[in-house]
C-alpha cells in the first residue's frame, strides 16, 4: 500500500479505451468542485520531454542526473533513472501537498491503490484482466453487473461526482 499524504486514484484501462480523453474532461469538472488535481502518467515508451538542441537537453545528455528547467510560469524536474523501475510512491512524494488535493494516476494498473477501471467491449479485450481488489468503480458503456459500482464512461460529470464522493470519504 502506498503511503502518501495526498490521496492517489488510479484511472486504468487498456490502450484505446479513452483514459486521456476522460481525464481531459475530468480536470475542469473536478476543479469546478474545488478539487486541485495533479497527474502521474505512466508511459511504456522511453519518453523525453526536453527538446534536442536546448541547453537543458544538452546538459542532461552530458550527464546531469537531475535537471530543473524553470521560468516564471512553471518549472519541471527531470530525473534520469537508468536501470531503475519507476516507483509510484516516490513520484507521488514529489508533489507539494499544500497545492494538491488529489493525484490522478493514469496507468500503473498493478499498483495497490484505489482505482477506477475503464472498459469498452469495442476495444476487444477482456474485462477480467482489469478487475482487482483495488477497483472501486467500473466506468463503462456496457451493461455489466458486478458488486463494484458502475458509472457511465460517457458521462464525465457522473465520474467526477463519484470521485468527489470518494475523496470526501478520505477526509
Image (cartoon, rainbow, N blue to C red):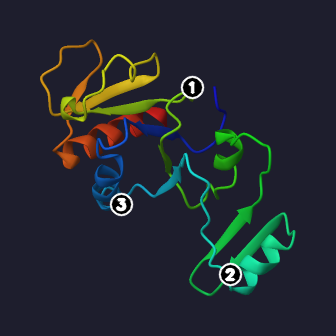
Q: Distance of mark 2 from mark 3, alpha carbons?
A: 25 Å
Query: Of 45 and 145, which appears nearest the observer?
Result: 45
Label 2 Cα crowd, 10 Å radius (few <14 / some 14-19 / many 20+): few
What residue do we see at 40% from left, 54% from top? 35
In the rendered structure, the answer to whether residue 160 lies left or right of residue 97 reads: left
- Considering every residue shown, the one lying at the far left of the view is 143
Q: Position of residue 93 (x, y in %)?
A: 69, 48
Question: Where does label 3 land, which residue?
Answer: 31
**Numbered disc 1: secondary structure:** loop
Q: Position of residue 27 (x, y in %)?
A: 35, 58
What residue do we see at 54% from left, 27% from top? 110
Q: Are marks 3 and 1 in contact (CB under 8 Å)?
A: no
Q: Position of residue 91 (x, y in %)?
A: 67, 48
**Numbered disc 3: secondary structure:** helix
Label 1 Cα crowd, 10 Å radius (few <14 / some 14-19 / many 20+): some
Residue 122 sits in quarter:
top left
Circle number at residue 112: 1
- Which mark is first along the chain, 3 or 2? 3
Q: Distance of mark 3 from mark 1, alpha carbons?
A: 26 Å
Circle nearer the viewer, 3 or 1: 1
What residue do we see at 68% from left, 43% from top? 86
In the rendered structure, the answer to whether residue 115 lies left or right of residue 53 reads: left
Query: Of 52 and 120, which appears nearest the observer?
Result: 52
Question: Where does label 2 land, which residue?
Answer: 70
Where is 84 relative to 132, above or below? below
Where is 77 relative to 169, above or below? below
Q: Position of residue 29 (x, y in %)?
A: 28, 57
Amino acid at each position: 500500500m502506498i503511503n502518501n499524504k495526498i490521496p492517489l486514484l488510479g484511472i486504468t484501462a487498456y490502450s484505446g479505451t479513452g483514459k486521456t480523453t476522460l481525464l481531459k474532461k475530468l480536470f475542469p469538472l473536478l476543479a469546478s468542485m474545488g478539487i486541485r488535481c495533479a497527474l502521474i502518467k505512466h508511459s511504456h515508451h522511453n519518453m523525453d520531454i526536453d527538446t534536442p538542441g536546448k541547453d537543458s537537453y544538452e546538459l542532461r545528455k552530458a550527464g546531469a542526473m537531475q535537471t530543473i528547467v524553470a521560468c516564471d510560469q512553471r518549472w519541471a524536474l527531470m530525473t534520469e533513472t537508468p536501470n531503475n523501475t519507476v516507483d509510484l510512491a516516490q513520484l507521488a512524494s514529489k508533489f507539494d501537498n499544500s497545492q494538491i488535493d488529489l493525484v490522478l494516476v493514469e496507468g500503473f494498473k498493478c499498483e495497490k491503490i484505489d482505482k477506477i477501471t475503464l472498459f469498452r467491449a469495442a476495444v476487444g479485450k477482456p474485462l477480467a484482466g482489469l478487475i482487482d481488489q483495488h477497483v472501486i468503480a467500473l466506468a463503462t458503456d456496457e451493461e455489466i453487473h458486478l458488486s463494484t459500482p458502475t458509472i457511465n464512461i460517457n458521462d464525465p460529470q457522473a465520474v467526477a461526482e463519484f470521485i468527489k464522493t470518494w475523496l470526501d470519504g478520505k477526509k
